[in-house]
Image: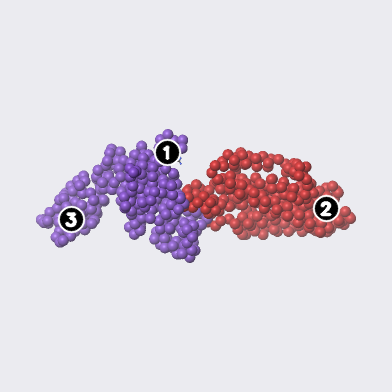
């Protein structure tokens, strides 16, 4: 069983001096792709698949998939992680972590296909698959974040007369925030990537742009789909980095 | 009907045959311990590592649940009382200090008042008052975070936090153990002065017999077998060690240490003359320690001391007589 948390990243590109580097990279990437596509004479198929409303709809679906699945992942992973660090749940914690580790080893496309076969296709099916896949980092980092809290602080809290619940809210959770945020950030990035596969379960997203590029054998379409996915991943990572900086408790 | 002992009216903490055996351990960490600690008394638990000092202390606020016996606080049996309520009325200071790193100094101090529903402005005021009390300037320190303070400063905050809800009882587990020796002595002295003002009932754990002798009104010495070997005043322990273990534990310096505990008034009764004779005596207050009197004599290169006694007149004691009186085993006690 691996209980090693994802390292608290040094939040690249969010130091005050370098904060604008990443958005700049994204803008250059998007500008480059736009310039490339405008330099081409598009055939009717390309014009249709690259129509702004088609691409923007795909992008919006993708964002919806990522946001919904990440929120659900947090809503499940954090309370579950907290529960599994309460006294008397050591065994259960080990089992759940092992299961979550194993689920991560299963290729995401496999999860999607199996779910699609069992439950059918669509947006919510894709969300379920994404949540299953992204649960591990959130769950693991919540557990590790809470377990690494200095026992002397918990002892001091209990000794002052804080109830176990008050200790959780005033001592354990605030001190676990940095590690938990690192896990949530990983889940977000995972979700942006894996959500491209949602196209296979008819849930739309940028994956549908990429797959039409492949199936129609149209390079510009493929490039636009991929570039948008990369740009989205970078933007999400950047935003998550900003959030980590803002939410990092002062004093630690 | 019951033959069980009850605490006397001036007892603040009363342990009645308290034992603790940790699960899976053959030997009890504390067994059948009975102790009575009076209101406003400063009691130090001392003994070798592993003799059950921490366990004893933590049974008083029930961070460790006794496996047997009863605990009374302020006359009430709290062996089965609500633990959170109980602990909010007992200050708790630990060696690791345990300040919450994500809260400011003021918020750390005000944590218990906050849980008790004290208004924000009052909490702030209380925190500043307490910082002042432990010798830290509120304007400088209230808004800082713990890691911006030195170890000694953090421990002062630890003491301030324990005092926040004005509990009648304070439990301290090696509170000065983590600070360097010079800062430690300073903290000890400041703490004694503070205690002189606030008169809490204090139980403190240490493994340092010097600290115990310096601070305690009474000292409880535990032997390695977790038995309470002696529970008495520092002077009584130095004068009359109960057994070989106590004698050994106190160390070879006992006669010299007694000098800082004996008062001049304790020794003049036994042997002093009313006439100065040819003695080159130096005036000393009867309330001074014998140690201080000797220091004065040696500094002034005098031959003895002159002590004014209540009701007029002076008594004289030469150096030899002073030392002889100070070396008398007991009889001068309280
Ligand atoms: N939580 C615990 N679980 C099991 N044994 C413990 C625990 N705490 C202390 N002990 C044991 O109880 C004995 C007394 O410990 P303690 O009260 O910490 O001694 P001291 O504070 O005098 O060094 C030791 O043998 C120690 O190993
Ligand atoms: Mg101890």
Residue B140 appears anywhere in the view: no
The residue that disc 2 covers is A220
Output the chain of dot 1. Answer: B
Q: Say left or right for B158 vs A38.
A: left
Above-or-below relation of B225 to B59:
above
Q: Which mark is residue B21?
A: 1
Task: Answer with the quarter of the image where residue B33 lies.
Answer: top left
Task: Answer with the quarter of the image where residue A17 lies.
Answer: bottom right
The reply to the same-chain question for discs 2 and 3 is no
Local packing at callout 3 (Cα closer than 10 Å; few below 14, some 14-19, many 20+) is many
Q: Which chain is red?
A: A
Q: CA distance from mark 2 to mark 3?
A: 106 Å
* Tint of chain B: purple
Ligand 1 within 8 A of label 2's CB? no
Q: Of tags 3 and 1, which is closer to the observer?
A: 1
The residue that disc 3 covers is B305
Q: Residue at x 58, y 52 (%)?
A: A177
Q: Say left or right for A69 vs A175.
A: right
Instruction: Please provide percent x and percent y for residue B27.
Output: 40, 35
Instruction: Please provide percent x and percent y for residue A146.
Output: 56, 48
Output the chain of dot 3. Answer: B
Q: CA distance from mark 3 to mark 1?
A: 55 Å
């Amino acid at each position: 069983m691996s209980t090693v948390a994802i390292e608290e990243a040094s939040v690249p590109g969010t130091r005050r001096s370098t904060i604008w580097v990443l958005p700049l990279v994204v803008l250059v990437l998007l500008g480059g792709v736009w310039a490339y596509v405008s330099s081409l004479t598009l055939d009717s198929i390309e014009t249709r698949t690259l129509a702004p409303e088609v691409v923007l709809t795909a992008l919006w679906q993708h964002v919806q998939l990522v946001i919904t699945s990440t929120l659900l992942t947090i809503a499940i992973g954090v309370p579950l992680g907290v529960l599994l660090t309460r006294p008397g749940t050591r065994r259960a914690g080990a089992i759940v972590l092992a299961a979550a580790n194993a689920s991560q080893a299963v290729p995401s496309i496999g999860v999607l296909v199996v779910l699609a076969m069992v439950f059918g296709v669509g947006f919510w099916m894709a969300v379920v698959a994404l949540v299953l896949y992204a649960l591990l980092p959130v769950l693991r980092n919540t557990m590790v974040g809470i377990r690494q809290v200095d026992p002397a602080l918990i002892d001091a809290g209990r000794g002052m007369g804080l109830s176990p619940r008050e200790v959780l809210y005033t001592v354990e959770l605030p001190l676990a925030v940095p590690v938990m945020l690192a896990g949530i950030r990983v889940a977000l990035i995972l979700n942006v990537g894996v959500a491209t596969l949602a196209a296979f379960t008819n849930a739309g997203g940028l994956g549908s742009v990429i797959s039409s590029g492949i199936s129609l054998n149209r390079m510009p379409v493929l490039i636009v789909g991929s570039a948008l996915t990369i740009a989205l991943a970078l933007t999400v990572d950047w935003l998550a980095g900003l959030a980590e900086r803002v939410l990092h408790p002062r004093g630690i | 009907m019951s033959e069980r002992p009850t605490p006397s009216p001036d007892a603040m903490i009363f342990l009645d045959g308290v034992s603790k055996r940790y699960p899976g351990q053959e030997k009890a960490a504390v067994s059948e311990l009975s102790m009575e600690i009076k209101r406003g008394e400063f009691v130090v638990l001392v003994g070798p590592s592993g003799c059950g000092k921490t366990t004893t202390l933590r049974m008083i606020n029930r961070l460790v649940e006794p496996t047997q016996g009863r605990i009374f606080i302020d006359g009430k049996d709290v062996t089965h009382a609500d633990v959170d309520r109980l602990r909010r009325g007992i200050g708790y200071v630990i060696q690791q200090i345990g300040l919450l790193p994500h809260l400011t100094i003021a918020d750390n101090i005000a944590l218990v008042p906050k849980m008790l529903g004290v208004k924000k402005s009052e909490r702030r005021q209380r925190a500043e008052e307490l910082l002042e009390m432990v010798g830290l300037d509120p304007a400088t320190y209230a808004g800082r975070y713990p890691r911006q303070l030195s170890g000694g400063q953090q421990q002062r905050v630890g003491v301030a936090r324990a005092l926040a809800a004005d509990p009648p009882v304070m439990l301290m587990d090696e509170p000065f153990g983590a600070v360097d020796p010079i800062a430690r002595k300073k903290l000890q002295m400041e703490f004694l002065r503070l205690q002189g003002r606030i008169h809490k009932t204090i139980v403190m754990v240490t493994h340092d017999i010097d600290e115990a002798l310096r601070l305690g009104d009474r000292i409880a010495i535990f032997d390695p077998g977790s038995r309470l070997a002696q529970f008495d005043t520092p002077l009584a322990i130095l004068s009359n060690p109960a057994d070989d273990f106590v004698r050994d534990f106190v160390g070879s310096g006992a006669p010299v240490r007694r000098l800082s505990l004996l008062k001049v008034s304790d020794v003049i009764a036994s042997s002093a003359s009313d006439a100065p004779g040819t003695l080159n005596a130096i005036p000393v207050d009867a309330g001074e320690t014998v140690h201080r009197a000797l220091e004065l004599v040696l500094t002034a290169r005098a031959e003895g001391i002159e002590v004014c006694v209540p009701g007029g007149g002076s008594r004289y004691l030469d150096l030899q007589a002073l030392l002889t009186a100070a070396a008398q085993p007991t009889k001068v006690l309280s």
